[in-house]
Image (spheres, coloured by chain):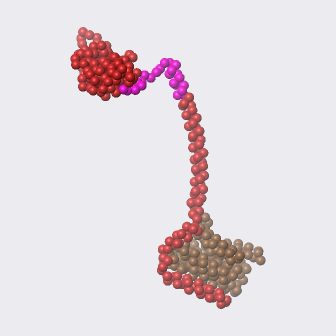
Amino acid sequence: MRILALIFVSLLAFFLSLNIEKFILIGNISLNPVIILLYFTTLYWKPMYGLITGFFLGFLYEIYLPVFTGTYPLIFTSVAFGLSLIEKKIFKFIYNSLVLLFCTVFFVNIVQVIIEVDKINSVFYIIFTHLIPEAILNSAVGFVILYFIKKSQ
Amino acid sequence: MNKKFLQVYLLFFCISVSLLFFDGFTDIKLGNKCYSLFSTDFHNFFSRFLKNNDLKEENARLLERIATLSYEKQIYNELKKENQELKEIIGFKFNYPKGIIPAEIERRTLEEINLSYQIDKGTSEGIERNAPVISFKGIVGKVLKTGNNTSVIQTLKNYNSAISVKDTRSGIEGILKWNKKFFIEGVPQYADLRKDDSLVTSGRGSVFPKGLPVGIVTYVNKKMDDYLLEIEVEPFEDLNRIDVVFVIEK
């Protein structure tokens, strides 16, 4: 049952990540539901689920992209693996742990930018105008989710 | 670290890395299909909704317009009916011909004086006495006698012929007659009638309807000892050369 719920939520997150820019876009920043799902699945549910979810969502991302490179499965599984490494070493039920979500979103986005943007000057520009605000926004949403997780315990 | 977890990660890692070096899936169409499956065009969805609202407004506007036009049409029909009734009351009737009967000339008199034709249509085809006869170019004459299958046409070239004509330019009216040549009678010297003016029937009398082309003025002269103009006319149609005429039903 839980697996089915995970599949459903994963597909929902994937669907939202494709369409979210069309109806929720603050300036040029938007939510990244896939990363948020990956983060909370790995840290607060089961690292194995996070790993599998990351791989298959990355795979779906690749299918969605016009050129199949295999980058996203690698990034998402690596993120899930990295989070699972530090899962036991942090106090994940305090709000300060959301710094990790900030770093995760920032890491994934900067890898995307490095892949897609050639000029290094543009990367620095995008970091301050796009990546940091987007990481803050995703952390804010993570704060809300963490609040409900804490409340449910 | 769970060993199984590490194995799964390594498996996924290897697959992902191998995909990095695999070039077989470039430009796959599957991507587009999946995109269309998962990606809903919300902008279009909302624009369709908004457009629907616009259409509703336009529909309401058009319905209102139809109602207004229907009402105006009703008024128009009422006025038309009223107009016809008033015309009938004052005895105003349009004298348009009912129809035209084509006929071939079977015989013609040889003499130049009192030229007449015999045509191949008679009362059985609906030809009546005194019906006006025309050709492609203009007026020819009128039906003098009718038989069952033949009729006799009295042409303009007849001493007894007298047709009321009108100048299309100035509206001056006169009587067209024939006496070895066509002339107009009854036009005073002060009248504005010039050479090359076109003449049509004026509609006076009971034979010829209004507006049939007659001929052209060829000569205008002011005599010193007369108060009327001397006017000569050339008919549009050469009456000695025609083979087909049209009888106008009365």
Viewer-nearest residue: B219 or A8: A8
Give the image location of residue A28, x and y in percent: 57, 68
| Magenta segment includes B236 | no
Judge from the rendering whether residue A10 lies leftward or rightward of residue A94; answer left or right.
left
As drawn, the residue found furthest toward the top would be: B225
Chain drawn in red: B
Judge from the rendering whether residue B113 lies leftward or rightward of residue A44; answer left or right.
left
Quadrant of the frame with the C terminus of chain B: top left
Viewer-nearest residue: B154 or A120: B154
User: Based on the displayed image, in which of its 4 quarters is residue B215 positioned?
Assistant: top left
Residue occupying the point 56% across, 29% down: B78
Residue occupying the point 76% across, 74% down: A151
Judge from the rendering whether residue B249 lies leftward or rightward of residue A151; answer left or right.
left
Chain drawn in brown: A
User: Based on the displayed image, in which of its 4 quarters is residue B9 positioned?
Assistant: bottom right
User: Based on the displayed image, in which of its 4 quarters is residue B172 positioned?
Assistant: top left
Viewer-nearest residue: B118 or A115: B118
Quadrant of the frame with the N terminus of chain B: bottom right
Residue occupying the point 59% across, 39% down: B67
Give the image location of residue B11, x and y in percent: 59, 86
As drawn, the residue found furthest toward the front would be: B148
Give the image location of residue A77, x and y in percent: 60, 82
Highlighted magenta segment, given as a residue range: B79-101
Residue B80 appears in view? yes
Give the image location of residue A17, x and y in percent: 60, 71
